[in-house]
Structures are given as C-alpha cells and as structure tokens.
Image (cartoon, grey):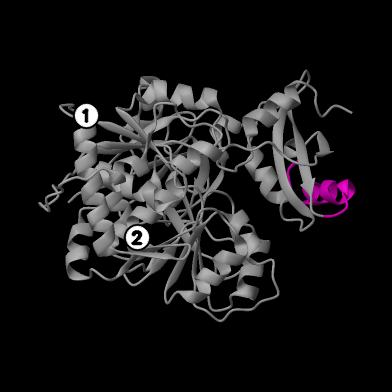
Amino acid sequence: MGIGQTIQETAGKEPDKPALIFEKTVIRYRSLYHTINKLRAQLKKLVANEKQVKIALCLGNEPAFLEVFLATVTLGWLAIPLDPNWTEREMTETLAKTKPNAVISSKHLQQTATSVPSEAIPIEKLKEIPVQAPETPWPSFTTEPFYIGLTSGTTSTSKQYIRSHTSWLASFQAAEKAFHLTKEATILAPGPLCYSLSLCAAIHALHRGATFYLTSSFQPAKIRTALQSQAHPYLFAVPAMLQSLTRTDVRSEKKITFISAGDQLRAEVVKRLKKSYPFGTIFEYYGASELSYVGYRVCKSEEKRDFTPFPGVRVSTWTENNKQAAAGEVGQIYVESPLVFSGYLNESSELNKGLSSRGATVGDIGIQAQDGTFSIIGRKENMLITGGVNVYPEEIEQIIKELPAISEVIVIGEENALHGQKGIALIQWKTTPDMQKVKAHCKKHLAAYKMPKRFVTVASFPRTSNGKIDRAEVAKQVARGVFEK
C-alpha cells in the first residue's frame, strides 16, 4: 500500500464524509478523490516519459497543496514542498539541489509570497484544462521514495532528506497506537504544510479516512473555535501555539487531544492548558524530520517524565568513545525503526553521519534509563566545551525557562582564552528584566561550569522561515560583538 492509496477506497465507501474543512468550505472525500484523479492525469501530460519525476510545490496552506501532493505521490513520484517565505537565494539554491521536473504554485501566492519561481505553473491553470481521468485503481508502493523534505531546525542551513512510503505508513501506525487516533478524529495542524510536522499530520488524516481541518495560518481565536466545533479534535502544534491558545479566560470542558512537538513543552504551558481545558489530554513527543516519531509522554501534571519509545522504535545511546552508554550516562541518541528516513539528498557525508549500523541519528544528546525510557539534553552540534567539559546549551535554556518572566532564551558559546568557551545567555522577557533572579536560579540548579558568563537582554530573536529561533544567526551576531556592552 502507498501513501494516500486509501483515499480511493474511502471515497467509495464514505463519499460524503468531510475530508478537508477549509475556512467555510467542506471538501468531501468524493470531491477530493476526483480532484486528485484529475491532477494525476494533468501531471502525467505535463511530465511525460521520465523515470523518476519530482514535482515541487510552492503553495501555501490551502487545499491545492494537499491535492497536488497526493496526486504526485500516488503516481509514484516525489513531492518537494518549497517554503514561499524563503528569500530568492534560498529558493534558487533549493531548486538547484533538488532539480524538480515541474513547479506548481497558485496565482494568489505569486502576488503575495516572498519568492515564487518564475517557471512555476499555476494550479488554477491545471484545474481549468479539461481532461479525461479514468478511475483505475491507484498502484501500491513500498520502499520507493515519495517525498523530499527540508529540515526545519534552528540553523539557517536546511538539508534535503528522503522519505519512503513505508516509513510514513509505519509512522501513521505508531501514532495511532500512542495517541489513540482513529478515523473518527478531526485533526488540526496549523503550522506550515511545507514542513513535516503539519504535513505528516494532514496526510495521516486523509490516508486514515479522518477529517483534516486546514487553516491558512495560525490564528488562536479561530483554532479555539474549531476545536470546540469538532466531535473528536486532535491538535498537532508547537508549544508556542499551545501557549497562545491559553491566553484567554475561557474554560472549555471539551475532550481535546493536544500533541506537542518541535520544541520543549514547558511546565507553565502544561499548567495553563490544563486550566483552560481540564478534560483534555496532552501528549509531548520527541522526533525529527529524519527520524519521525521516536518517543512520547503523557503530560498528566507539570512534572516532567522521560519519553517512552513509540511502538516499533528502539533507542540506544552511545558515548564519544564509541561505547554503548550505561543507564544514566550521557550519550548520543540513535534510533532503529522502520519509521526513519532513507538518507540526505546528494550529501554522502551527511548520509554517513545520519545512518549507521547503530541506527539513525540527528546528533541529539540524551540519557537513557534502565527501563528504556530516555530524556533529551541537547544537540551535539550546539555543544560547548568549557574547561575541557561538554556543556549543552539546551540544558541551561531549560533551567532558565523555568522562570515565568522569561519569554525566550538562547545560550551561545563565546571564545574564552582561559576556559575555551563560555556561554552567553540571551534573554527575551515577558516582564521587567531581573537578571539577579536569573543568576540566582542558575546558581541553584546548575553546576558552576555550566553557568553562563554573561546574561544579556534582547528585544527579539531572528527566526527561520519555520518560525524557530535562528540559532546560527544569533551565533553570528555574538561573534560580531552585537551584544557587547
């Protein structure tokens, strides 16, 4: 079975079931299937006699994105989502690396987006051209690649990774078991569809025969209304979105499943969510674009729990001496599962780093307990070496974020003649800055060698196109002395 192949079956058995809800429009499975079928025919006319076809999608959060994506992958081709908010240089570099056979966009996006390739074909044009679309069975696919995604981490340089049909199908099964997700659900994932967190949730909903509630952007008031209106709502979101949903005095008794990923879910956000939605269930999961789902936990209180590996996932930790870490010992996280990616595009060195006999890794550092549960400390590429000791900025950031007055914090290494590197904590505040309180909190909860050398107030942070803090750009600013007194 291939990704999206079940849509044909759902359209036959439940033709009037809502597949997509977008603004005031309901697209039912019968209509979705016919649109995908027509686009499949149009794409085959557009790109003929090619062995491995790649279709790039420069589209916003709109039904056309999912329609073109599903038309592409059900043909056995590769879909390449592009971010319309990239600069012209970022767009040009990505197209040069991925070499798509065609780029599909939309007329309205060409007028509003930061960067749309000049060669892009408007989706409106494809839909207007009459075409005969025979309703033949869609073929099955297994280990064939179907998707070239782009990492959405906190660095400014994205890598292109490849996913197979079976890796996402296995991911769907793991999520259904862990989150108790069925086809009766309505799934919301208001992040950009051009990145895997929201895209995987959307395609999972449609492949499962559930309903996907699509939003053009994240608007807290509209999301709250949507959650209230659906019978079995599931919300996949980053912690910042969940925090925005709690900025209201409204108390809901709706049974909503919140699924948080992409960043650390702070205790304060859990507490506020439980106050606003006391009958809701809150999951937090650890994963990555390349690894898919790795570990999850149920947030029953503000107290942190270790992650439990998803069904079918094996996690191990390895020290820098190439030995498997003992229980409680710090090590690099490796993942063995059918959910992981197939490698990076055109980057053999990164492929060697990402895939090995131990499993797949993205360089995250953690600690594993005797029972197999694990916690994440930070990422190897962000590690500082101070006085010959490894220090992980994310661990320090987590401690500082425990203070309710803190909005955001990033710890970056500064070169130091005596110690090698010392951390500088850059802090964005919700309220009036109180550095003495931060220093006292760090002194109480951090070893002396982990204490940042300097604490600096900033008004805001540069961000990547996916909305995450651009750690690489912050590091460049630190190197340029932007934050010197």
Nearer to the camera, 271 or 377: 271
Density class for disc 1 (Cα within 10 Å; few <14, some 14-19, many ≥20) is few
**Where does the C terminus fall, quadrant-wise?**
top right
Nearer to the camera, 310 or 272: 272
Q: Is residue 482 left or right of residue 177?
A: right
Quarter where residue 33 is shown: bottom left
Q: Residue extending furthest top?
A: 417
Q: Position of residue 2 (x, y in %)?
A: 20, 49
Q: Which residue is mark 2?
A: 205
Q: Residue extending furthest bottom?
A: 253
Residue 245 visible from this viewpoint: yes
Residue 347 lies, with reference to residue 32, above or below; the image says above
Residue 117 lies, with reference to residue 309, above or below; the image says above
- The verdict on residue 70 being magenta is no
Residue type at mark 2 is Ala
Quarter where residue 291 is shown: top left
Which range of residues does the magenta coloring cover?
431-447
Earlier in the chain: of badge 1 and badge 2, it is: 1
Q: Which mark is residue 52?
A: 1
Residue drawn at the location 42% of the way across and 45% of the way down: 196
Nearer to the camera, 425 or 241: 241
Nearer to the camera, 228 or 450: 228
Q: Is residue 290 left or right of residue 109?
A: left
Q: Position of residue 427 (x, y in %)?
A: 77, 43
Q: Secondary structure at mark 2?
A: helix
Q: Position of residue 83 (x, y in %)?
A: 48, 37
Q: Position of residue 166 (x, y in %)?
A: 24, 46
Q: Main secondary structure of the magenta part?
A: helix
Residue 165 visible from this viewpoint: no
Quarter where residue 87 is shown: top right
